[in-house]
Image (cartoon, rainbow, N blue to C red):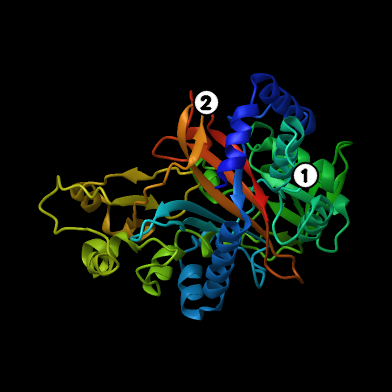
Amino acid sequence: MIPELRARFNREFSPDRYNRFLDLVYDRCRMKVEFRLAETPIFVNKKLLDEMAAAGTDLAKGLIADAKYMEAARQAIPKEYRVAGETAHPNFLTADFALVRNGAGALVPRLVEIQAFPSVYGYQAVLSCAYREAYGLDPSLSRFLCGMDEASYWKLLTKTVLGKCDPDNVVLTEVDPLHQKTRPDFEVTGRKLGIAVVDITMLEAVGDRLHYRNAMGKLVPIDRIYNRAIVDELIARKIRLPFDLTRPWNVEWAGHPNWYFQISKFSIPWLTRKAGPDSVVPPAVFLDEFLEGNGRARLRSLGVEVGDAAGPGTTYSNLLLKPLFSFAGKGIQFDPAHGELESTPVEQRRDYLLQQRMNFVPNVDTPCGMTQAEIRILYLWPDDGILTPVLPLVRLGRGKMMGVDHNRNQEWVGASAAFIQP
């Protein structure tokens, strides 16, 4: 973090500027944002963000190159969600990082999660632009990574989403998109790229093609799907799609659904097996390994203080219990008790992991006190291109969880952006 820029922002802040910022976001999304927007962006040294971006790139490429891992990841996909036509690589990737103190007291990034699924690419670009304009931030501070600017960013996002298809035949699909909190991103993306936003439950199959109905009710064939529908939401809502996902449809996927499973929390125990004590990857093991195998010993070997279980009431304050395939922090349990772990049915234990709990360092000075930042690196990977880190996304919080849903009724927390000093 950059103290002089932080101090200047706090000194020049006013509620009027914050309201101007909110008005700009509203105008450019053309709708209200249903989650809290932080009063401030953060100001970060380029070297730190480059380190995070490189770590995410290396981890993702290492996983894809590991044939044994990839086979195990494919087997972890529920059979009814194993989609045909898997692409050679994911088109989208996100890597979330915490800032923690290492053994020497230095501030270092640690991976929170890595996920091959789209994030709010359109909305985040609008958000960071609104911060700059509302607060009159120094134009030399960059919003993008890899030397990108506004034009080159949108060009690469357009290429990644559309491929070589006509926008009229590309759709952004989601479950009930009009009532999702991420709708502002759908609206920005749809307008900017010229594609329709469609409820995935409204797609229509004719022969080997999928179709949607445009604004005039005409049935339009789909050549490419920018998929934003999350499998755990389909399962939780007990949604039956009007087409068989596993059938080899004549359609391209921008963000093939299989990658949601294949680069996810499922990967972290595998990454742990290759990690050293100072790895960017916090140690993690599958729950069945912890209870029935060598998982406890593996955590100890990597410096995690995990004592022998004394009984059902023994709690593990250094660990988090996480379901593998959930989104936005759903189902994460702090201080899991041994009895609760053992109560998980044996056949379901492979669907959870135990991960070292990281202590976020509050390092953003605000009028409400020191605040924690979680930084997400957004990547794009076009069909015929390279994996490229493009934009940082930030969450500010002062609670156990960093998601915007977990920091309500507070100020100077919520969704935010990063400005990069060369």
Residue 260, x across and y down, in percent = 56, 58
Residue 375, x across and y down, in percent = 55, 49
Classify the position of the C terminus by image quarter.
bottom right
Q: Quadrant of the rendered structure where residue 34 is?
A: top right
Residue 96, x across and y down, in percent = 52, 53
Where is mark 2, residue-wise? 411
Where is mark 1, residue-wise? 139
Q: Is residue 406 visible?
A: yes
The tag earlier along the polypeptide, 2 or 1, is: 1
Q: Height in image: 55 above or below 212?
A: below
Residue 149, x across and y down, in percent = 79, 53
What's the residue at 24%, 51% (across, down)? Answer: 341
Left or right? Give the position of 27 relative to 317.
Answer: right
Left or right? Give the position of 1 relative to 384.
Answer: left
- Inspect the image, locate mark 2, and give the three-letter code of the amino acid beneath it: Glu
Q: What secondary structure is found at the residue carrying circle 2?
A: loop
Q: What secondary structure is found at the residue carrying circle 1?
A: loop
